[in-house]
Amino acid sequence: MALRKLALAASVALAMGPAHAQISDGIIKIGVLNDQSSLYADIAGQGSAVAARMAVEDFGAAKKGMKVEVISADHQNKPEVGSSIARQWYDVDKVDVIVDVPTSSVALAINQVTREKNKAFLVSGAATSDLTGKACSPNTIHWTYDTWMLAHGTGSAIVKTGGKSWFFLTADYAFGHALERDTEEVVVKEGGKVLGKVRHPLNTQDFSSFLLQAQSSKAQIIGLANAGGDTINSIKQAAEFGIVGKGQNLAGMLVFISDIHALGLDKAQGLIFTETFYWDQNDRTRAFAKRFAPQYKGNMPTMVQAGVYSAVLHYLKAIEAAKTDDGPKVIAKMKELPTDDPLFGKGMVRKDGRKIHDAILVEVKKPSESKGPWDYYKIRSTIPAAQAFRPEKDGGCELVK
Amino acid sequence: MTEIFGVPTQALFGQLLIGLINGSFYALLSLGLAVIFGLLNIINFTHGAQYMMGAFVAWFLLNQAGLSYWWALVLAPLTVAVFGMIIERTMLKQLYKLDHLYGLLLTFGLALIIHGLFRNQYGSSGMPYAIPAQLAGGQNLGFMFLPNYRAWVIVFSLVVCLSTWFVIEKTKLGSYLRAATENPELVRAFGINVPRMITLTYGFGVGLAALAGVMAAPIYSVNPLMGSDLIIVVFAVVVIGGMGSIMGSIVTGFGLGVIEGLTKVFYPEASNTVIFIIMAIVLMFRPAGLFGTQK
């Protein structure tokens, strides 16, 4: 009798135990690290923390007896600030995974720290395709989009419609350089040419001088290899100087819906760019946006915030399946399980850490076509997942060799 | 086409003009700082926040009250000046007898609070503010397309700067002000209400910042961050010109705008540091600034 009881207890312990026993200190801690005070705060910021909390809720962590906590911090777009927060989180605060991290230079630094500490890193905000190329890591997954995808989606669409000569306005740091490099490659491959480029400091207020240089280059397309506040000011001031409509056109290589909201449709109309998420895409995205907006001052989610939701959801599923929160083991599980969520649909994570899903080529509506705030995009075409991202073999990632 | 260092002269003219436009913002802002420092001995770190508030008041007036840019040009500086005067009366007044550092800390703290509140409410992308219809469009000058609004910015800020200089340096009111800074006891003995004069002066300096904010609204988006980015540069301008020198701040404001503009052509990567390099060099050879006098 006593033996049977013991056996029963043992089998129960075996069945139930590991799921809890392997979670370090019984709690899964998710650290949302991004810009919360400067030019990228509306793209990611607190909205990403909101999205992460929604994912925890939708996963049903509480019902499954898993304790999940979401914390967030501001990296101020500085790699050294980001790294020290990451070390503090991993070493002292027992954070298991860092998510989001826009600003490529900061993301590359966190990528390194995460690998050193053997934790997990899910990138949604940062763009550089190096995260799944020469900087790829068994601890990192690059979720939402990257510079290669933007360059091929937007760049080739524009070259094909006749925009053969380009001039780049590039943000002078890792992200801008990567985006410029990837776009230039596409432009040249499609038979266009690059007439010149100018590199501006991150977070510039006045672009008129750079725009004038672009104008005198006589290039058909002025490619904006920048983001957030920098893109907003470039587009606004290009309109002021009457650049568009005199034979020159702007190509925003990375544009978010929050940028369009800030610009207004009269200035943004007609812009063509690539996204991986639009809140008004289908019933599931609309339902998500309807829940998201009231928690974030009425703003619709950007693709970065949607990506945080999707990544956290898949991360928790992988922990449930792997029964551990050990960094590389969870990442391996995430690559093994197919992804499926309401925002990005079905997809997968490749060996190099690249999450793949469809991308959409959108055009900004004219003011007369829009039904009101946030009704901004016409979807021109869908780029299937298999073509949207850089082929695994071309990235030079050591994990796929 | 003739070229200078590989840049066509025509393009260079364009860049010079753009430098002057940016310089007019530097001049307006550093002028306000110089007036406040010169007459009150307060290093006003809230200046950037007050500049941003000027732009926001303009935005509120347009969107809540339907009042145009032209109304904002008058009402926004007044509103923000009143806010400034309340701060002067309730907080800054207590600090005049103490070291500069206390005033700097107080105004810096206030700036952080104001920036934080606006950012929390309005995010970081900013709000659109259209160029007034009367100033839309532009002129083709041959070497560049000059938007009418930017031309207006240069002319208007020059007028404001020079009138301020004239009032302070050449009129009776200005001489009272300057005398009150030198020896408040004596001026009071002549029956002049010195504390009220100081409050109004602070209000005027703050109003100048708000005026610059209204003028910036149609060019940059109305953005909670607009002041915190600019204030550091403007402080460098004031230091180069000489703390408290009225003419110095106007001339250096425009001059540094031009130098920054040229840097954007010849070595764009350095365009946000060039002003600080100049500041370091100037401080080495003339610690009181180009137009300052050692006290």
Image (spheres, coloured by chain):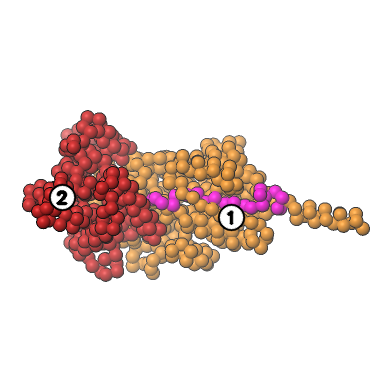
Chain colours: A orange, B red
Q: What kind of residue is marked 1?
A: Glu
> In the image, which is nearer the foreground, mark 2 or mark 1?
2
Closest to the observer, A133 or B215: B215
Q: Is residue A24 magenta?
A: yes
In the rendered structure, which segment of residues is drawn in magenta? A19-39
Q: Please give the residue where the numbered disc 1 appears in the rendered image.
A: A69
**Chain that bears disc 1:** A
Q: Is residue A4 left or right of residue A369?
A: right
Task: Looking at the picture, tell me which residue is in the foreground, B289 or A139.
Answer: B289
Report helix, strand or loop for mark 1.
strand
Name the residue rendered at 70%, 53% in the picture.
Answer: A20
- Give coordinates of residue A381: x percent, y percent: 46, 57
The residue tagged with tag 2: helix, strand or loop? helix
- Extreme residue in the right direction: A1
- Amino acid carrying label 2: it is Glu
Q: Residue at label 2?
A: B185
Q: Is residue A194 above or below residue B166?
A: above
Left or right of A335? Residue B283 is left
In this picture, is A261 found above or below B158?
below
Q: Is residue A159 magenta?
A: no
Q: Position of residue B123 (x, y in %)?
A: 39, 57
Please give left or right for residue B224 compared with residue B72 in the image.
right
Q: Tell me which residue sits at (44%, 52%) in the image.
A: A36
> Looking at this view, is B125 or B143 the one in front?
B125
- For disc 2, the chain is B
Q: Are marks 2 and 1 on the same chain?
A: no
Label 2 crowd (10 A; few <14 / some 14-19 / many >=20): few
